[in-house]
Amino acid sequence: SLKELDVIDWRDFPFPAFLKPAYEGSSKGVRIASRVENLAGLKDSAAKLLETYLQPVLVEEFIDGEEVTVGLVGNDPVRIIGIMRVVPRQKTPYFVYSLEIKRDWENLVDYECPARLAPLIIDKIEKASLSIFRLLGCRDFARIDMRISKSGEPYFLEINPLPGLNP
């Protein structure tokens, strides 16, 4: 609830923040406006999400950088079948892979697979992805979404243990 936001000490929270519904998939509730600059924006965005989706809202630090997705299959061993980078066609101060972008992907982004990233970054993504898959007890296949910070560190956003298999 919005009242819960008032009891949190936000002084050390690293804005900008990113908000999304806790229990949705397929980018429901993930919009360009999901990135907020300050506490006032956070409260406004949270209120809209709470009213629209009637569920908890995740508030996380916004990681500026590259958007990648990692496909994994198998169990023992699990293996990575590909790393794809989402490359915006227009330069903007920051990129949010939002529902608006996904609805008009043919005009707004390019999908780069395999991702053309430095070998050290690819290695970090692969190691993190395999660890996350195992740690969360996934089986058979999954897709992991990450952001790669400007300094080259992968940040885990979410795992989709039953991802869509669009072409």
Image (cartoon, helix red, strand yellow):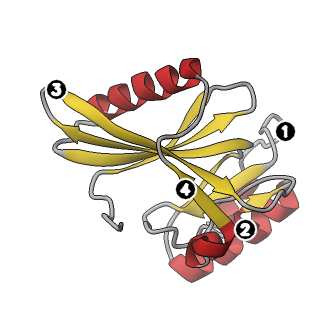
Cα distance in 3D space between marks 4 and 2? 19 Å
Q: Where is mark 4, residue-wise?
A: 111
Q: Position of residue 119 (x, y in %)?
A: 55, 20
Q: What residue sits 43% from the left and 64% below the top?
A: 23
Q: Quadrant of residue 102?
A: bottom right
- The amino acid type, in three-letter code, at marker 3 is Pro
In three-dimensional space, the C-alpha distance between marks 1 and 4, rounded to whole angstroms, equals 38 Å
At 58% from the left and 36% from the top, the residue drawn is 116
Question: Foreground mark, 2 or 3?
Answer: 3
Residue 39: x and y, percent? Answer: 84, 55
Q: Earlier in the sequence, mark 1 or mark 3?
A: 1
Give the amino acid at mark 4: Tyr
* Secondary element at image label 4: strand
The local secondary structure at tag 2 comes to helix
Q: Residue 25 appears in which quarter of the rendering?
A: bottom left
- Please tell me which of labels 1 and 4 falls first in the chain: 1
Image position, residue 97 (x, y; %): 63, 60
Q: Residue at x 84, y 38 (%)?
A: 11
Distance in Å between CA atoms under marks 1 and 3:
44 Å
Q: Which residue is mark 3?
A: 77
Quadrant of the rendered structure where residue 58 is?
bottom right
Q: Image point 25% across, 32% down: which residue?
A: 79
In the rendered image, residue 111, in percent from the top left (x then y), is placed at 54, 56
Residues under labels 2 and 3: Cα distance?
A: 38 Å
Q: Amino acid at mark 2?
A: Ile
Q: Secondary structure at mark 1?
A: loop
Q: Is residue 152 left or right of residue 135?
A: right
Mark 4 crowdedness (10 Å alpha carbons): few <14, some 14-19, many ≥20: some
Disc 3 crowd rating (10 Å Cα; few below 14, some 14-19, many 20+) is: few
